[in-house]
Amino acid sequence: MSASSSVAIQRIRSVAELREWRGPAGDVGFVPTMGALHDGHLALVERAVRDNEGAIASIFVNPAQFGPNEDYRAYPRDEERDLALLERAGCHSVFLPSVAEMYPPGDDMRVVPGDIASRLEGAARPGHFAGVCTIVAKLFGMVRPTRAYFGQKDFQQLRVLQTMVRSLALDVRVVPCPIVRAADGLALSSRNAYLGADERARALALSGGLLAAAKAWVQGERDATALRRTVEAVAHQAGSLEYVSVADPVTLREVAGRAERAVISLACRVGNARLLDNVLLGMTLDELAEL
Ligand code: PAF
């Protein structure tokens, strides 16, 4: 495994090459992605480079996690741009498998998550988290990382994958990393590329609503309904709100009444984009990492 950021990033396309690269020893930090990289991904990569002897990212647009009417075909793909960004972030290697490499003939196994995946994104996108868990479990088996880095922006994905690692006793540490936002507050997402200028301006109401709830929390508001209404009052201006949830950050069950800790998350359609955002209250990401 190469540990220098001054050399060109190593491109690995097959599982056989990946196994050779991995070798028997050494700390490896892993950042799984679907490409269309932005500063949120690059923050994960920089952390992986800092924490480990070797850092590897993967770029694979996973068909199994998209529904039949979702944006699998339209998902933005620009391999050369992504590789230049990874190289600049000091990433040593990148795994770029084909669909046939990840789902070879004879593939007949899925990782199906339980209760933690049943609500919110799981309810809105049936089968999505089985697709995510299956591909991440495969990638973990191939890369054998010491640590894997996931962003808070996809909060439920983070919790589902933590639960998978614990339930299947996988030998990898999931490292949750904070949401990276544009200067005006919009959470970075590959799907922001679908927004026109007007839509992007309207989308600021999403982080605006969450910020209003976070302020209310700091001022002592703990009632889940009041917190949800505070978000909705602002965020509805962005587009068509699918849900605003005030849930326990560990179980993701909705809080009824008083919240001692909460993740307030939302999904909203803004033009052709379906955007997610959230805020974690009364619990830190470091505490979440210890679950
Ligand atoms: O968050 C993503 O980009 C994807 O869901 C992941 C974790 C790379 C699995 O395909």
Image (spheres, grey):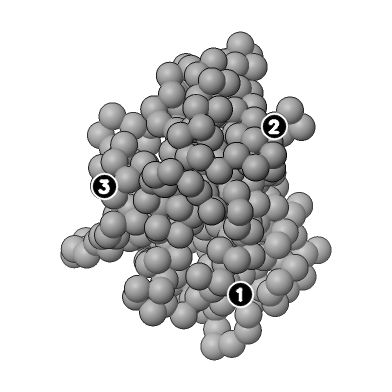
Question: Which sits earlier in the primary sequence, circle 1 or circle 3?
Answer: 1
Q: Is mark 1 within 8 Å of ligand 1?
A: no
- Answer whether residue 165 is visible to the viewer in this image: yes
Question: Which sits earlier in the primary sequence, circle 1 or circle 2?
Answer: 1
What is the distance, in whole Å, between disc 1 and disc 2 at their CAs? 32 Å
**Depth check, front residue: 203 or 75:** 203
Point out the frontmost of discs 1 and 2. Answer: 2
Tell me, for residue 185, which label it has, or none: 2
Q: Amino acid at mark 3?
A: Gly
Residue 166 image point, x, y percent: 41, 74
Q: Is residue 137 left or right of residue 113?
A: right
- Asked where in the image residue 169 lies, by quadrant, the reply is bottom left
What is the distance, in whole Å, between disc 2 and disc 3 at their CAs? 31 Å
Q: Is mark 2 within 8 Å of ligand 1?
A: no
Q: What's the residue at 77%, 64% (across, down)?
A: 5
Image vertical order of residue 40 relative to residue 1, above or below: above
Mark 1, secondary structure of its residue:
strand
Identify the residue under disc 1.
28
